[in-house]
Image (tube, rainbow, N blue to C red):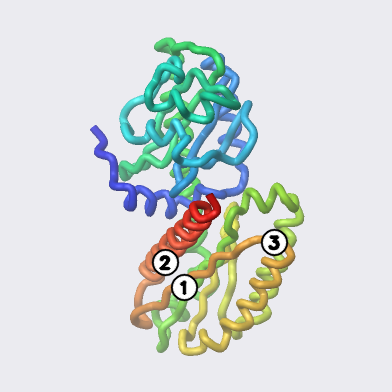
Amino acid sequence: MTIPLDETARQRVLDRYRITESLPDPAFDDIVRVAAIVCGVQRALITVIDRDRQWFKAAVGLSGDGTPRDQAFCDHAIREPDRMMEVSDARTDPRFADNPSVTGDPHVRFYAGMPLVTTGGAAIGALCVIDTETRALDDRQRVALNSLARLAMALFEARHREHEAARAKLADTSHGNAAVGQAETNYMVAIIELQDATAVMKRIGERTLEARFAELQHALEARLPKGDSVSRVSGCAELILLLHDSVNVDSVMPAMREAMAAFEHRTQSLLLNVQATSQTPSERIERVFERADLARSREIDRLSGRAESSRSASG
């Protein structure tokens, strides 16, 4: 039996997978289409349970990017990672009878969701099917939904490995062992990430977003000292900067912030900017990336808390 991770540990795992706000992927769209057909329902979703929301990685029969977490059926499903959660009539289930998705649009009656669990045991979301009519899956449909959930998680794992490999390759090919890990001075890793990338893309268009991101990359490259680099990992709204001499970082930051501010103004968006510096010149870059990732998670925690406070104040 899989023992659920505590929420902080679960969230850190989700952050490392870079799923939330990842760019569209046709493979996941195909999975939800097949799930809806096999189960004979109107709607199917691949969801990710983030800090305060349920985000849709793929959806059929339902519009929007997600829902508040406190309204998410899948938030209940991930609490038992080893089993499928099935609700025949949400109106009679005390967990969901007063849920806005049940009492109002889209008038959910039936739900079945299979948790998506990482190899480390973190339930990060679910593959679910939804209908406006009461029903129950038969055994064959349950087996199919379970199999499709494993396929979706296998794709997430593969995308995660690709991201990690691409990131390591960028560091390796851009700098080589003589530049990073054997230099005489400490070095710094910076991660610049677009927040709410899906919403930005829908607002300004995928091509425009790609063009603006390329402009940002070129602007940063023009401002970096010779020998330093900025690279983008394919499929992510994220740039990675490697600066050889951490002593000169302060002199570079004003120019970097200027380029980022121009991007934010043109796209009406927010960029996250976190850094981690090597503790010794010979420290392996993987360890520095780990600290940068942790700084990223903590900054997202902070921003999420600030947004929640703002919503509470306005309410």
The reply to whether residue 142 is visible in this rendering is: no
| Label 2 SS | helix
Is residue 263 placed above or below 123 in the rendered structure?
Answer: below
Residue at (42, 66) in percent of width and height: 295
Q: Earlier in the sequence, mark 2 or mark 3?
A: 3
User: How many residues crowd mark 3 within 10 Å: few (<14), some (14–19), many (20+)?
Assistant: few
Q: As drawn, is 12 to the left or to the right of 207?
A: left
* Amino acid type shown at disc 2: Ala
Residue 45 drawn at (x, y percent): 54, 31
Q: Which residue is mark 1?
A: 275
- Residue 268 — which label? 3
Q: Position of residue 192 (x, y in %)?
A: 56, 67
Determine the secondary structure under disc 3: loop
Position of 287 with respect to 314 (left or right) is left
Q: Is residue 271 visible?
A: yes
Point 42% across, 19% down: residue:
87
Mark number displayed over residue 295: 2
**Disc 1 to disc 2: CB gap under 8 Å:** yes
